[in-house]
Each structure stands twice: as C-alpha cells, then as structure tokens.
Amino acid sequence: MTPGDAEPSPAEPPALPAGSRDVLPVEASELREIEAALRDRFLAWGYREVMTPVLEFAAVMDRAQEGGLGRAFRLFDESGRVLVLRPDLTIPVTRLIAGRLADHPGPVRVFYVARAFRPPRPGRAQPSELRQAGVELVGAPGPAADAEALALLVESLQAAGLAEPQVTVGDVWLIAAVLAGAGVPEEVAARMRRAAAERDLVEWRAEARALGLSGTATTLVEDLPRLRGGRELLARIAREVPDAAEECERLGVMLDLLDRHGIGGAVHLDLGVLRDRPYYSGIVVEAYAPGVGVPIAAGGRYDGLAARFGRPRPAVGFAIALDDLHRAVVAQRAEPSRLRPGVVLVGGMDDDLEVARAVRRAGVPVVALERGDPSGEGLAAADGWRFVARRSGGEFELHDTATGERAACRSLAEEIASRA
Amino acid sequence: MPLGALHDDSVDVLESAGLDVAELRRAGRRLVVRSPDGTTFITTRPSDVPTYVEAGAADVGIVGKDVLRERTPDVYELLDLGFGGCRMVYATRAGDDPTRAAIERLGAVRVATKYPVCAAAHFAATGRQAEVVRVSGSVELAPLVGLAHGIVDLTATGSTLRANGLVEREEVLRSSARLIANRASHKLRAEQVESLVSRLEEASR
C-alpha cells in the first residue's frame, strides 16, 4: 500500500433496501400463530390453499387494469420480456382460477397465505414486502356469497385474536345507481366516483353542488359518501331514489344473512368506502382495528376481473394484511409475549443426551448446552424459555424462572409436566 | 394543528365548533396540549400534518389544500374550512414571458419551487416540459440570479412577487384550509368525527 491509498474501510454495517426488514424469533412466532389461526378458519369453511409464483409476466398482470399496474418491482427475463414481482395476490389467484380451474364444477373456494411486493413511496415508512392471507370465492354471485366472505373475514380476524374487528362495507353499484337515478350525467358521476375513491369528500360535494340538482335526492347525493348505517339508511335511499331500490334490496338481504351468520354487529354500511376500478362491482370491504391507522384487511366483489383472464365468473374475496393485523393484536394485548414452557438443559449436548431425548419425546422443547456451560439462565431469559435444568449428583436441579423456585427431581420430564 | 399562517384561524374555528381551546391558546412552546374536554391537540409544521394523520398519530388535522396536493397523503379530506385562502402561481421576471422561448430553444422551462409535485403536474397537464428545481426558501431569488426561468409559489397579495420584480403568469391552484381524517379513525371513531364535521360545517359557514 502506498501512502496515497485510502485506508481500508472498516466493514460497513450491512444495510437493507428501503422498505425491507428482518423478522426476529418473537415476532416470527406471533406471525405464524396468526397465520395458523387464519388457515384454520379458511379450511373450516372449505377453502383450499393455492400458491402462485412470485414472478409473473407484467403483460399478464397489466390486463387487470387500465393504464397497467401501478407501483411494482420490474425486471427482465433472458429474452427481454418484462417480469414483475407480484404486487398483489388477487390478480395472480384470479389468473390461476381462470386458467387452471376453468372446468371446476361449482363455486371455487381458494385461499392463499403469501407475500406481495411493492416499491415503497419515499418518506412514508411503507414496507416493500406485504404478508397477506386471503380468500377468493369465485362462481357465486349475489348477497349470499358476499355474506359468506364477510362472515369468514370477521371470524378469521377474531380467531387471530382481535376482540372487536370493525368491518365497513361500501357498494359501487349502489353509488352508481343513486347518481344515475338522481339524474347526474355520467361524466360528472365518473369524476365524483373518482373523488370518493380518493377520499376527497370536498371535491365530491363541490361537484354535487355545481350540478344544481333539485328534488328530494339533492341532500342525499351531496352527502352520499358521508353516510353510514344499516337498514334505515337503505330504506331512505330506496325512498328518495327509487331507481336504486334494487341495490338496496340486495344489501338488505346481505344484512339479514350477516345477522344469521352471527356477525351483524361487526359490519356497518359506509358509503364512503369506494374503489375506482372498472372491474369492481357490488360490495367494497375494509376492516379496521384500534391502534392501526390503515385498513387491516380489504376486499370486495369484482365480477369483471376474471373475464380479463378469459373465463368470466363472478368473484368476491378479501386479503388480510398480516403485519397490520399483528400490529393490531399487539396494540390490544397489554402483556408481553409469555415464557414458553421449554427447558435449557445444561449437559444436554453431551452428558445427558438420553434425558434430552426423553423430555423432547414428552413434548417439551429442549435447548441443549454442553456440560458446565455457564450461560443457562442468560440464554433462557434472552430466548424466553421458562426452565433451566442441570445435573446435581444423581438428580437434576430444575430452575423455574417464572416462579424463581429451584427443585430437585429424578425425572425432568415428569417434573416439567407437573408445572406446565 | 398547523403552525404558522393557518394556526390562529384554526383555533378560532375549533372554538366556534364548541371545542375547549383555552389550554391550546396558552400552549406557548408546548407541542402536545390536553384539554379538559378530553381533546389532545398536537401542533406541528403544516407540511407534517398529513404525515401525523396518515399514520394515525392524530385522528384529524387541519392543513392547506396546497400541502395535500404536494404530499398526496392517504387520508379522508372532509371539509373545506374556508379560511387560509391563497393561490399557487407560476411567476417570471416582469417583461416578456420567457417560458415559450425556453421551451422552444432549450426543450424545457426551468422552474424553481418548494412544491415540485404541484409544479411538475401543472406543466405536465398543459403539455409542456419543465425542469423542476427544488429549493427550500426565498424562491423569488431563483429567476433573479438565473437559477430558473420562473417560480411556482404561494401568494396571498402578490406583494413579495412585486417587490422582487416578478409577475404572475399562470394560476396553478387555489388553496384553503381543509379538515382531514385518518382512514381508521374515520371508521372507528365515526360518530365523533361526523359530529366534529357537522359542527365545523356550521361554524365555517
């Protein structure tokens, strides 16, 4: 090295791309518990799991919407075709159902637990990797299928540990019918729907007022995206805009079914919940929980989507954002994660292999250390294991870190079983 | 609550909507103030208001439409509060407008601004190319020393423009104060948010 050379730099701390993050053991196990609870519910309703590739052709995913996909990670294959890391799961799963399950005889019920990828917007603390669990119910039109999807959503969120999930339901057909029935010209209605989808209620009202409507429905049209409620809201709309009565009746049937599913209290109509994609039809769903500022689940009916993949069929579904659901569960659960009933066995790597094997066979996790290793209690505390055991004479000393007790015992497996 | 130009009117309109703002008026340099009626007021720079509301650190916020256009936060925009009116304009040095010549001979007009998103959108919407230069303050300086052909900035009376020998050429947008709400708060605290909207609607009429 000559004097002019730069000093060899110390190793830089290894960085991650913006939006990426590692998941450490405590969070990973909590995420897996949530996943397991959701999977259990999906299976109980007869949904079967599918998996789609992370890489798709951009041209195929682009079919889902005018103007192509929004934000997505793109790359090229060896012949120069553009690939994307799937930016959501609904579109790939719809592609799969249209292509691979085209001959399926009845309604198709599938679920997925998978990741989608989206480049984060700068300065927004958005993840680039989205863990999602969702279902698609394809081939069943009508309010009974809508109610099933909503019931499964509520039941799944509860099973994952959310005490009070709040599910809001809007409806693109109802909005369209009210605007058309009140005499709003289609090009203005399109601008109003876009404003509502962007949650700009000021713009909606400005457009509505500029129309100079007169008649019974004027206030209704101006306030539409602010309205929430249940059957009384549907009755009012049907009375003031008779052309929308059919949509109101459909939603009324759905509300009745939700009551019979036993989840009527968790679901509210909210006409401000809207999406501006031409393939959306009927209900639009968002779920919220205290402590999380974004929806923890979203979905709805998109009867027009499957046709874009060559097999038109009505479809309803939802996707739960696992990381947001986990945040909501953490926000509502005050106590930190509990100690797990495993044992750190000093000598379990060499002197007491047989004992370690017996304890594991009894269903208790054993973290083995070499004889004389002093790190027993420290390791147990760091990783959340409840017990530490070491040989003392012909017996074992079992240290229960939950209570602080130290007991002498002949059979570790029995002693731990009696305390767990 | 936004610091700066919108602050006093915001406090006034909340008071006429029936909120207890006495503690907020006495806040001094405190950024978080709790009122006896249970409201917590968070005061921050206007451009940060959407950030707090989008993340759910605040349920609702007051901020100018100019900031919403620039930041495009994912929030509900509930109400035009009517005050804080101002305009965002494109201005160049007095005399011949250099914009057309710049685009014809240089391919693009160079524009200095604190609002790069709004500026770029304005020129894109009118089919012209613009090179947007981001600056943090005293935007008027840029055309005077040759950094840019023009500026996009807010103006209320136009006096700062005039004092620096600039004239307005085009209006980019009209702004006023807006009430915004976090997406989850808008659903989970629906009744409280709706009641606030109704009272503010009444008060700002």
Image (spheres, helix red, strand yellow):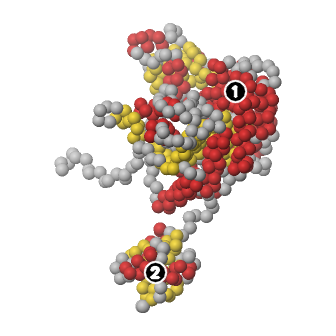
**x, y percentage for residue A180?**
70, 22
Q: Residue furthest bottom?
A: A394
What SS does tag 2 mark? Answer: strand
**x, y percentage for residue B105?**
39, 11
Q: Any mark on residue A177, and which? A: 1
Q: Residue furthest front?
A: A105
Residue A39 vs residue A7: left or right? right
Q: Any mark on residue A301, and which? A: none
How crowded pointer 1 is (Cα within 10 Å; few <14, some 14-19, many 20+) is rated as some
Residue A1 vs residue B60: left or right? left
How crowded pointer 2 is (Cα within 10 Å; few <14, some 14-19, many 20+) is rated as many
Closer to the camera: disc 1 or disc 2?
Answer: 1
Q: Which residue: 43% across, 82% down? A: A390
Q: Residue furthest left?
A: A2
Residue at image mark 2: A389
What SS does tag 1 mark? Answer: helix
In the rendered view, tell whether residue A373 sits above or below residue B201.
below
Q: Amino acid at mark 1?
A: Ala
